[in-house]
Image (cartoon, helix red, strand yellow):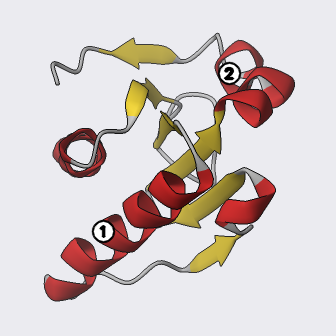
Amino acid sequence: MDFAKRIAKIIADKHGTDIVIIDISGLSSFADFFVNATASNVRLLDTIVQEVDRQLSAGGIEPKSMEGKPSSGWVLADYGDVIVNLFLDEQRNKYQIEKLWSDGVFVEFDE
């Protein structure tokens, strides 16, 4: 959980909003947590993606994969136990990840 909160803090520091951490460890075999957040525009989404990657890479942590582009409105970064979903508002509303995983445990995160 500390790793998910660390990622959430990086996102918050770069002005990501509506940050939600969901513990899916009891529901999924592919990850333990989702960290979902929204960026207000494509440029900010790109900045957040780059900052998360920069800070984690500096500590020797590389994503297993990264899908999507900021211009698409959704970037997914797979860090093994933690899946990071960074959205523009329109895509977040469209895909409703929190609703799909509502059986997970929503973890308190104070920005």
Tell me if residue 55 comes above or below residue 109 in the rendering. Answer: below
Badge 2 element: loop
Q: Residue 2 at x, y = what percent? A: 16, 44
Q: Which quadrant does the N terminus fall into?
A: top left
Q: Which quadrant does the C terminus fall into?
A: top left
Badge 1 element: helix
Tell me if residue 8 comes above or below residue 50 in the rendering. Answer: above
Query: Could you say which quadrant of the image residue 98 lies in?
Result: top right
Residue annotated with mark 2:
101
| In-front residue for pair 104/108 | 108
Tell me if residue 81 comes above or below residue 41 in the rendering. Answer: below
Could you tell me the amino acid type at mark 2?
Trp
| In-front residue for pair 82/25 | 82
Which residue lies most toward the right here? 94
Q: Residue 48 at x, y = what percent? A: 39, 58
In the displayed structure, does residue 96 sit left or right of residue 24? right
Residue annotated with mark 1:
51
